[in-house]
Each structure stands twice: as C-alpha cells, then as structure tokens.
Amino acid sequence: MLAKDVIERARIILQDAGSDYWEHTELPKWLTDGRMEAYNLRPDLYQKTEVVTLDEGYAQELPNGSRKLFEVIRNESHPDKRRITLVDDDTLSRHRPNWRSEDPADEIIHYLYTEARAGVYEVYPPANDDPVTIEICYAKIPEDIATYNSDTQLKEEGEYAQALVDYILYRAFLKESDTVPVSFQRAAQHYAAFRAALTGQLIAQEG
C-alpha cells in the first residue's frame, strides 16, 4: 500500500476532502509518527540485514539512528567470514578484564548488546581502521512521509499498513477533542484498534 492511499482512506473517514479542519501537512506527519509507533511495537517488521563498516575501537552505533539490534552475524571483510557470537560484559570481563583497551584487530569474535542501551553495541576485540566490515541484522528506522500524496511504498508494514489508518484517525480525533470532548473517546478507540492490529492485544476502554 502507498502512503498516499493510507492518508486518503483516513481523509475519507474524516469527511474532510478539502482539508478544512485537518491540514494537508498534518496527516503525513501523523503517518510518520504511526510508522515510528509501529517500529516501537513491532521492530521485527522493519528487520534488515546488511553489511556495515565498524568505527575504530569497541564502541559501535547502529546505522540510520536505529535502536534495535537483532543479531551480529559474521565477519565480512575478514577472509574467514567467522561467525560472531553474543557475550555478556560480566563473562567477557571475567576472562579479559581489560578487553576494551586491547589492541585493535581485523576480525571480530564477540559482540555485546543490551536492550537498556538501545542503538549501540560493542565488539571484541576492538576493531582496527582497515576498515573492518561485518554483517548485522537490525530494525531499520522507517523513512518519513513528507507529503500527503507521497508514493512511498509501505512495504515494511505490509499487511499491517491498514492499521496506520487507525493511527492517523487517532491523532486527528485527539486534536479535535480540544474543542469536541466526545472525540477523545473515538481517538482512544482508533488507537486501541491500531495497537490490536499490530500486537493482537486489546486495550481496555474506560467509560
């Protein structure tokens, strides 16, 4: 489904074809926000495997501002293509207490990653500046939707793209609730539908 199709479906339900209440610039922003909300709820939808070049040293950042790492897979630049295994800091530090200050190498053996430090990971031994490339699997941040008639294909969301209509409606009715209080309940219903479509979990409604 195209981004503009999602926006148009939302606009039909809002009965605002002339953008009299909800401006053209608002719905694309809400669609972008909806994609980010989907990213947080279902990062697996945005899973991507690619080869990355490491920074020199042990500290690394995920590309494109991404926050979820699924796996560091293997060495790419080293001819042996050795698989890279996950290790926790306590275990590695017990055997190599000064591992962060060891000499850089062109082959990576382990990686360290915790959800508490989203967006960053560490490698052992520290990478040198050859450069060193590895293959990783991570959740790539979805691109922004800039205009209401965007031809961006929502391929990551796939069958869940329809849920983004509910997210746009949620934001639209939330805005309207400032002047029409009853719209707050409708906004909550659309958010619950959005979340349920992505996670299979219903949100209890008040009232």
Image (cartoon, grey):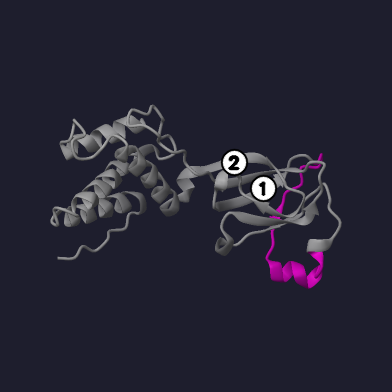
Q: Quadrant of residue 165?
A: top left
* Circle 1 residue: 73
Q: Amino acid at mark 2?
A: Thr
Q: Magenta segment: does it hold 20?
A: no
**Mark 2 or mark 1, which has the lower sequence index?**
2
Q: Which mark is residue 22?
A: none
Answer above or below: position of 52 versus 202.
Answer: above
**Residue shown at 39% from the left, 42% from the top:** 32
Contact (CB < 8 A) between labels 2 and 1?
yes
Q: Quadrant of the C terminus?
A: bottom left
Q: Amino acid at mark 1?
A: Ile
Q: Which element is circle 2 on? A: strand
**Residue shown at 41% from the left, 54% from the top:** 41
Is 26 on the left-hand or right-hand side of 205?
Answer: right
Q: Quadrant of residue 130?
A: top right
**Residue shown at 84% from the left, 60% from the top:** 102
Res 195 seen here? yes
Q: Which element is circle 1 on? A: strand
* Circle 2 residue: 49
Q: Which residues are magenta?
A: 78-99
Q: Magenta segment: does it hold 94?
A: yes
